[in-house]
Amino acid sequence: METIQVSVVTPDGAVYTGDAELVVVKTTEGELGVKAKHIPLVSPLTAGPARFIKDGKEEQVAVTGGFIEVRPDQVTILAEAAERPEQINEDRAAKAKERAENRLNDNGGHIDKKRAEIALQRAVTRLNVAKHK
């Protein structure tokens, strides 16, 4: 099967580079799957795993926001933040998830609900990707 070159880049530098037969990301409109020779496009991303599948094996990177740029021979993910499974501190991610859930369940406080929801989504993504070590 044909492959496509993939790179995940953050303001701090490259997080992932490689080839994949299929790239799956979570956009603001839903999941997007990309194979070689896909039509060019640019789409905003939400927090979620970026999945790279090749030869029946899957690698994942936890992506927090940003954009995906697709060309027929290359996919570039420009992420606000991204972590490979081995870079994720599971204890810290679990505590962040708990804090976000507590903020969302605090009916008496004045919280930024949207910000807490994003923090929860980011923590859940990090925990799920960490399981693929």
Image (cartoon, helix red, strand yellow):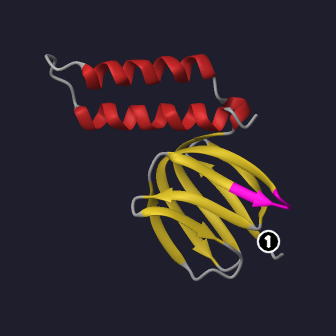
Q: Quadrant of the C terminus?
A: top right
Magenta residue check for 125: no
For label 1, the crowd category at 10 Å Cα-Cα, with few meaning under 14, some 14 to 19 and many 20 or more, is: some
In the rendered image, residue 131, in percent from the top left (x then y), is placed at 68, 33
Element marked by disc 1: loop
Which amino acid, by three-letter code, is at mark 1? Answer: Thr
Is residue 3 toward the left or the right of residue 88 in the image?
right
Q: Quadrant of the N terminus?
A: bottom right
Is residue 26 toward the left or the right of residue 56 in the image?
left
Residue at left 50%, top 33%?
124
Residue at left 36%, top 23%?
101
Q: Is residue 90 above or below residue 65?
A: above
> Mainly helix, strand or loop, the magenta region?
strand
Residue at left 43%, top 38%?
121
In the rendered image, residue 40, in percent from the top left (x then y), is placed at 56, 80
Q: Is residue 89 above or below residue 69?
A: above
Q: Is residue 36 above or below residue 124?
A: below
In the rendered image, residue 89, in percent from the top left (x then y), is placed at 63, 22
Q: How many marks?
A: 1
Please give the residue where the numbered disc 1 appears in the rendered image: 3
Is residue 64 toward the left or the right of residue 120 in the image?
right
In the rendered image, residue 49, in percent from the top left (x then y), is placed at 58, 47
Residue 32 lies in quadrant: bottom right
First to last magenta residue range: 52-56
